[in-house]
Image (cartoon, rainbow, N blue to C red):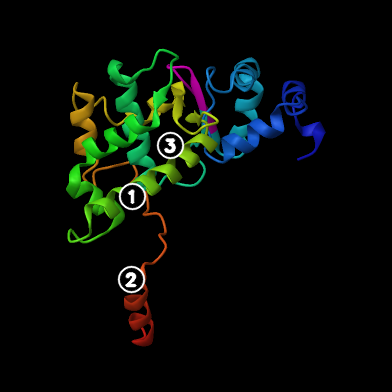
Amino acid sequence: MSEAELSKEEQETLGHKLFPSVDLLLRAGGHISPNGTEEEYYFLAGHRSGLSNWYRRYGYSLIFNENAYAYLAPQGGLSSGSPLSISDMVAGQSLLVMVLDPKCLQIDGTYLLNDFYLKVEQILGEDGMYRLVDKRRSAVKEKLLRQVKERMDQSLRRLARLHFISLDRKGERIIIYRAIQRFGEQVAALTFDPEEAIRQMIEFGKLVWLGEEPDEEPDELDEDDAERAGAADEGGL
């Protein structure tokens, strides 16, 4: 598209120093809120019209949620960027439950990583944890907890890249941004009890992201899975 086809407002917006980084974050599925990315959020708010017109040309809508966070979505209503995995959804919804629980909030406004692990374990239950890591119930409990923790650590890093949260330098505390409330868009319609709503949603098959069931994330094959995959390949399946 040539510069002549752009409005003056769009030209000024696209020429702003923050546009390239904000554009990349939004198109990757990132969420921008004033308590996590303050400068970027107020850039979006101040250039809302020009940015909305720009993204509309390509079939996207710039959404400003009433809880003060913004994100990009195709006009069909689905989320932009890569779909979140089930592990990401479990992490995000567990973080939301922590926000709704005053006992989890620390004096400095952060949340403890260990409290997050406990909340995930509490919400999923033992059966849910086995299902999350796709392990037989005969697996040793300590190994199960370690694998769930590894999954959650991966998901926390992904949610941090998308600006739902950030982690402190020591990796012991979580700073949760307003955008985490996006995980509650499914909760409000279910029940006034947030924890009960999350428990209902984390029965796999009911857990959704913007009305769509997320695809399973590709996992590394363990030895048993690798053997079964190899046998299937040899059989021509």
Residue sitting at the far top: 107
Is residue 64 in the magenta section?
yes
Q: Earlier in the sequence, mark 2 or mark 1?
A: 1
* Residue 189 position in % (x across, y down): 23, 27
* Residue 21 position in % (x across, y down): 68, 33
Segment colored magenta:
61-70
Nearer to us of marks 3 and 1 is 1
User: Main SS of the magenta segment?
Assistant: strand
Q: Quadrant of the C terminus?
A: bottom left
Q: Earlier in the sequence, mark 3 or mark 2?
A: 3
Nearer to us of marks 2 and 1 is 1
Circle 2 residues within 10 Å: few <14, some 14–19, many ≥20: few
Q: Disc number at residue 146? A: 1
- The picture quadrant where one finds residue 15 is top right
Tell me if 162 is positioned left or right of 88 in this view: right
For numbered disc 3, what is the local secondary structure? loop
- The picture quadrant where one finds residue 62 is top right
Identity, as a three-letter code, of the amino acid under mark 1: Arg
Tell me if 87 is positioned left or right of 140 in this view: right
